[in-house]
Image (spheres, grey):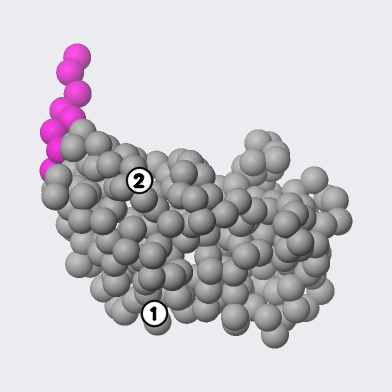
Amino acid sequence: MTTDASGLFTPLTLRNLTVPNRFAMAPMTRQASPGGIPGPDVAEYYARRAAGGVGLIITEGVRLGDLSAAGSLDIPTLVGAEALDGWRKVTSAVHRHGATIAAQLWHQGAERGDRDGVAPVSPSGVNGKGESIGRALAADELPAVAQWFAEAARNAKEVGFDAVELHGAHGYLLDQFLWTRTNLRTDEYGGSVENRTRFPAEVVTAVRAAVGPDFPIIYRFSQWKGTDYAATLAGDPVELQELL
């Protein structure tokens, strides 16, 4: 028996993005941008992947502008003139090989850890192991966090990215709002599925407002976590459907 795989080599168009084939490179954390600035080696790294024929590259996690977003300053950012100039060189290098590229926007939340004098922030001040760490975000702080995502997305579009991906998986900040183990809130952002999805949805809304109607937004989602591969957000398919 043979399987027709020709569809994998056909273009895919979504809004204003046309991906030349159906192969995507998954994001992989690298911590290879000292001071948050992607250098020539980063452009070369992604150019090699584009030259290999992949249609869509999703970058490593790109930390948001606030220091609470990620623990290592070697994780690239999308804030500041030098960082943006570095990313322009990355996107240009990828485009020269005919590929497309999305920036994965990342806030680690409680998984950041408490170091360098900056406490992590999260829905309830606990990590995926149930340990108290950092502090809980107040409801009136959440619009500013959503704007950190929006600012990074706006800058990504400006420097030539073809899409953004919001890292809403693996037990990081957005996922921490979805997971009952890390979301212990009793306000409008905790408890029911509707309430637990409220902040991630507000982030998507803020990003959409920042990038306009035709710029693709990918939302990365998972049930399992980096600290618990058996974790689930929903107890059954009906609840999972409601959450999604």
Q: Quadrant of residue 109?
A: bottom right
- Per the image, the residue denoted by label 2 is 42
Q: Position of residue 59 (x, y in %)?
A: 39, 49
Badge number at residue 88: none
**Highlighted magenta segment, given as a residue range:** 1-10
Marks 2 and 1 sit apart, C-alpha to C-alpha, by 26 Å
User: Label 2: few (<14), some or many (≥20) within 10 Å?
Assistant: some
Considering the numbered disc 1 on the image, is that residue within a helix, a strand or a loop? helix
Q: Position of residue 85 (x, y in %)?
A: 32, 64
Give the residue type that dot 2 points to.
Val
**Is 152 positioned to the left or the right of 93 in the image?**
right
- Per the image, the residue denoted by label 1 is 210
Q: Does any portion of residue 80 appear in the rendered image?
A: yes
Q: Position of residue 161 (x, y in %)?
A: 29, 61
| Relative height, residue 88 to residue 214 (above, below) | above
| Relative height, residue 232 to residue 187 (above, below) | above
